Amino acid sequence: MNDMPSHTRLFRRGNVWWHRGPIPRDLQDTYPKTEETFSLKTSDHKEALRRLPRAMAEVQERFEEHRRMLARQQEPALLELTPEQLKHIENVYYWHLMDEDEEVRLAGLDDAAFKELNDLIDLAEEVGRYELARGEMFSPFTESEAAEVLTWSNVDLKLDKASPSWPRLYRAIQTATVKAAEARRQRSEGSPVETPPEPQTNQRAAGHLASTLIGEWVAEKSRAKGGWTPATAAANKLWAERFVEMASDRPIDGYSKADAREFKAALLSLPPNWTKIKGLEKLAMKEAAKRAAELKLEPMSGKNVNKVLGFLRAFWNWAKANYDVASNPFDGLNVKISGKARDERQPFTLAELSAIFKSPIYTGCQSVRYHNSPGDLIPNDDGVYWVPLVGLFTGCRSGEIIQLRTEDVKTEGGIAYIEVTDDGEDLSLKNSGSRRRIPVHRKLKEIGFLRFVERQRKLGHKRLFPDFPKAKDGTYSTAYSRKFSNLLKALEVKHDKISFHSFRHTFEDACRNSRIPLDFVNALQGHAQQGMAGRYGNGLYGLQLLSEEMEKLSYEGLDLRHLARHSHMGAIAQQQGCFDSPG
């Protein structure tokens, strides 16, 4: 709560009483004075006390104005002014000129002052009409007046310096100047022209501008338990702001289907990472899309276009739920994609799997850091060794694996299993259906996974793979994705259709070929059940049933016997108490 100083006081300077008050605590670092002091213009103490409340109110208004100024500085600048905002500014400036003129006349004018006033009126009208007629929007006077009016309390708008709205704002100032000159001349001729009421409406607040709501949306989604990671928040915010930049910043209910279609058309022409392509990187989105089409650059995939459109659709759905928004302009705008999801990411071939699990990581490498170079170390006490194996035998996403805690590997009824959950600090899942229990496959046990887990517990690690810290984007998988991509490149098997996510498709194919029923495959992979089955119960199969199906899983032709030998050697070392981290 803003605190008004309780020890505001009077003091005498000569025979005159003065007001003195300290600066509120929340303003002390930014306010231009160390205290507010000014004369009450009376030597009578009783009169000073009578004037004090008004003086205190004036000081409080100064403090509030300073707070508004600080708030404006923190807000993102508007990319463009709406027609309603421009009209409001014109009305405010017209009122200002008429009110100022009325004060001059009320003070009284002799012949010389009257002539000087009319000369100024003629000059203002002449210059205003000249600039309006020729489209000359950049006179120093008009520029300074436009910048000033934006700061007034009944306007209170912050406009981006590169906004295309500045010429329109200058024209609003010039229009108000000419209209006021005409009205002021009528006053000089003796006609009773009234000053209009001061416009009070702040158009920004009344219209719920999209730019303002984007910040609210991202903040709310990021605060929620299991909410957006910083990377997800940044991506949603970036594309929502790009839409607003392209379509102009307006009240949220002021956008149409045509705006959404134009945005979609631009997306369909933009290449991926277009902001890093020479010749496009400095262009606005619409111009970049046009230029990319002229250069015949390969556009981003339909999947990515739909992803971006999904960001905007989600934003409008949130706005509909929280504000008076009638419809979502992005409904039904998805791009139709031919083929299946695996057209984007393919499963690994047997040759690719063999190459991965006979790489230096599994046959001997120089060190954990230089794990793609041959050497004598088998890093089977490190995440770089285990994460691909867990991916192979669980079908989990890399983020789900790397965020696992040692407590997430459990035993119930003699069945060891991995619990994939977002119930914990720093844990997140793709969706609620991703929560699941996955029995530990017998091959993982043979290779020594459970011994590795027990070792991590004895060493006091809370996370199963503490060697992979969270990245700056808020995810555990970002840094590892680069490591795994480098592994594929070192093995000379890397191509656009494979990544760590390919283990998920590989697992699904292996389940199918091992005759595991689809319902169990979905349960193991965290796919939501469809229809009535997905609406009732907790959607979880019993561990015994899951374990029986998991034991059917096999990868025909994939030889992992060398890993079991490493496990036997590791078990002997563990029995001897050798827990020091390798390399």
Image (cartoon, helix red, strand yellow):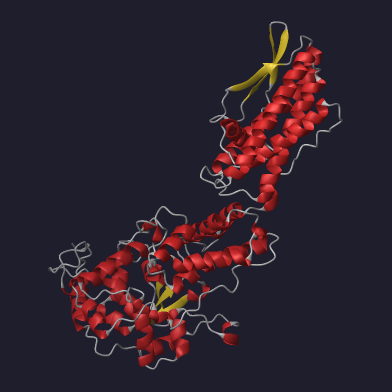
- 332 and 195: which one is in front? 195
Classify residue 372 as left or right of residue 451: left
Q: Is residue 324 above or below residue 183?
A: below
Residue 108 position, x and y percent, is 81, 17
Classify residue 127 as left or right of residue 99: left
Residue 476 location, quadrant: bottom left
Q: Which residue occupies 58% across, 49% down?
A: 80
Considering the image in quadrants, where does the C terminus appear?
bottom left
Residue 497 seen in the figure: yes
Q: How many marks?
A: 0
Residue 205 seen in the figure: no
Residue 288 position, x and y percent, is 44, 59
Q: In this view, does 317 lie above or below 40?
A: below
Residue 27 location, quadrant: top right
- 488 and 553: which one is in front? 488
Q: Which residue occupies 80% across, 17% down?
A: 109
Looking at the image, which residue sits at the far top?
14
- 224 and 473: which one is in front? 473
Residue 70 position, x and y percent, is 58, 37
Classify residue 257 as left or right of residue 94: left
Residue 30 location, quadrant: top right
Q: In this view, does 548 lie above or below 102?
A: below
- 407 and 42: which one is in front? 42
Looking at the image, which residue sits at the far bottom?
515
Considering the image in quadrants, where does the N terminus appear?
top right
Q: Which residue occupies 77% across, 19% down?
A: 114
Residue 106 position, x and y percent, is 82, 21
